Structures are given as structure tokens and as C-alpha cells.
Amino acid sequence: MEQPSRGPIYLRYSRAFKQKVVEEIESGALTIAKAQRVYDIRGGETIQNWIKLLGKNHLLNRIVRIEMKDENDKIKENEKKIRQLQAALSDAHLKIVMLESTITVMEREEKREEDVIKKLGKI
């Protein structure tokens, strides 16, 4: 005879058990992956959460940024230079557009002058 389903099973671990697993990992007796296999702990981040809560966080993956004392000042100085160069480039582009427009206007005016000279020559 089949028993009715009671829904999903949620495992609860005692604080003492969590502490034992964390201590074994921190001592080097087990890796996180091996502890999951040995104790049949299914959650991917379960043990990592236990380490955050109960252990020494030195075993978790971290990104550490090491910089020289004056590195931050150099970064700010380089960012300032970049802004100055961008402004200079923008000014150069504006000058190019202005000069191209001036040349276009001058070419139109020269054509008009040629037309006027031809007409004057016929008179």
C-alpha cells in the first residue's frame, strides 16, 4: 500500500553539527566538496554560509586589491589627463567642421564670382 506524499523534505542541521563540519574544513581535514559528500549536504552554498556564520572567513573566495600608496593619486591624475585629451579632441573636431563649412561657403562664392565675371564679359 502506497503512503501519501507529505511534500518536500527540509533538512535542518544542529548548530553543533554545523560547527563540527566547519572545524573539519578549517583544520584541513576536509575540503568543502568532500564535506558535502561525506555528510550528504546537498545545498551548493550551505557549507559556505556556515563558514560565514560560524567559522573563519579566510577560506571563502575573495578578491583582494593591492595598490601602492600613490597609485590612487596616479589614477586620478590619469583620469584628469583623459578628460583634457577628450576636450582637446572635441575642440579639434569642431574646428574641422568649421573649416569644412568655411571651405564649402568659399567654393560657392567663387562659383558665383565666376558666373558674375562670365556675365560681365558678355556685356
Image: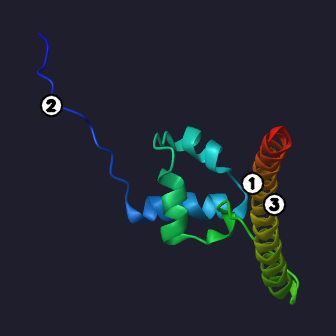
Front residue of 107/37: it is 107
Query: What mark, if any, has residue 6 been given in the picture?
Result: 2
Q: Is residue 47 above or below residue 90?
A: above
Position of 53 compared to 73: left or right?
left
Q: Measure how far apart labels 1 and 3 are at the Cα level.
A: 10 Å
Q: Nearer the viewer, mark 1 or mark 3?
A: 1
**Quick one: label 1 or label 2, which is nearer the N terminus?**
2
- Mark nearer the viewer, 3 or 2: 3
Q: How many angstroms separate mark 3 from mark 2 (CA)?
A: 82 Å
Horizontal and vertical percent position of residue 67 = 84, 79
Q: Specify the quadrant of the image occupied by residue 38.
A: top right
The x, y position of residue 54, in whole percent, is 51, 70
Percent of width and height locating residue 107: 81, 49
- Amino acid type of disc 3? Leu
24 to 54, vertically: above or below:
above
- Where is residue 10 drawn, in percent x and y? 29, 43
Q: Amino acid at mark 2?
A: Arg
Q: Are marks 1 and 2 in contact (CB under 8 Å)?
A: no
Relative to 30, is 57 above or below?
below
- At label 1, the amino acid type is Val
Coloring scheme of the render?
rainbow
Q: Give the residue pinned by disc 3.
A: 99
Q: Which mark is residue 105?
A: 1
Could you tell me how far apart the alpha carbons at marks 1 and 2 are, in whole angstroms?
Answer: 86 Å
Q: Which labelled disc corresponds to residue 75?
A: none
Label 1, secondary structure: give it. helix
